[in-house]
């Protein structure tokens, strides 16, 4: 994993690239993902240690993008995204220790941005965020605008 250096972060008045929910059952990986996403300009609005908590947090915070581990206790990241996709527009970047096979449960294709294999580097996440932006533009998923 990349090391995180707070001095690399630029203070900016630009709006965040994405509002994001992050889920991983390994606390050190969860913390790493939050740091990297923040560094890349995202606003992390929810953190979860399992799929059930992820669903609850997403219902409450309504992020534009979810970055989630595939295998977690109580409910997998795949199950969480499949459930959320029935309720709201959502894009997801999945993270796993291995390449995905058949998706069980099936996740709607329009929700899937990328599958990243651990260990995940900052550059992997940056590329996935670019893919998410392309997918958002293609699907015309509108980002909420800030109210002054």
Image (spheres, rainbow, N blue to C red):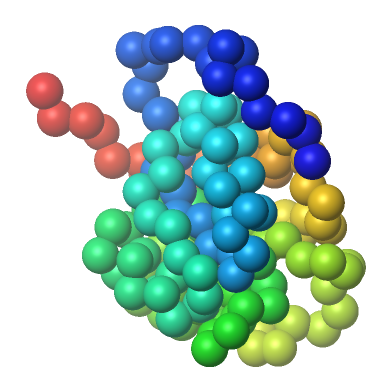
Position of residue 4 relative to residue 14, above or below, is below
In depth, the one of 106 and 120 nearer the eye is 120
Q: Residue at x 82, y 83 (%)?
A: 102
- Residue 91 position in % (x across, y down): 53, 57
Asked whether residue 130 appears in the rendered view, the answer is no
Q: Classify residue 7 by image quadrant.
A: top right
**Residue 141: x, y in percent?**
43, 49
Q: Is residue 26 left or right of residue 34?
A: right
Task: Pick the quarter of the image with the C terminus.
Answer: top left
Residue 9, image x, y percentages: 54, 16
Q: How many circles with numbers are drawn on the protein? A: 0
118 relative to 83, above or below: above
Q: Residue furthest front?
A: 28
Q: Nearer the viewer, residue 122 or 80?
A: 122
Is residue 19 visible in the rendered image? The answer is yes
Whether 83 is drawn above or below 113: the answer is below
Who's the residue at 28% across and 57% down the image?
61
Q: Quadrant of residue 39?
A: top right
Q: Indicate left or right for 51 with 122 as reference.
A: left
User: What residue do we see at 60% from left, 69% from top?
Assistant: 25
**Residue 29's quadrant in the figure?**
bottom right
Q: Is residue 9 above or below residue 127?
A: above
**Residue at (88% x, 68% y) in the render:** 99
x and y, in percent, of residue 129 in the image:
63, 39
């Amino acid at each position: 994993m990349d090391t995180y250096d707070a001095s690399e972060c630029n203070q900016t008045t630009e709006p965040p690239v994405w509002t994001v929910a992050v889920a991983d059952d390994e606390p050190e990986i969860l913390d790493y993902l939050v740091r990297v996403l923040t560094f890349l300009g995202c606003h992390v609005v929810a953190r979860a240690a399992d799929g059930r908590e992820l669903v609850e947090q997403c219902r409450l915070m309504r992020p534009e993008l979810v970055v989630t581990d595939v295998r977690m206790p109580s409910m997998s990241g795949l199950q969480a995204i499949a459930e959320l996709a029935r309720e709201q527009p959502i894009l997801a970047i999945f993270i796993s220790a291995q390449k995905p096979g058949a998706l069980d449960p099936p996740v709607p294709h329009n929700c899937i941005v990328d599958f990243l294999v651990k260990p995940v580097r900052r550059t992997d996440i940056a590329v996935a965020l670019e893919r998410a932006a392309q997918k958002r533009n293609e699907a015309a998923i509108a980002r909420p605008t800030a109210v002054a």
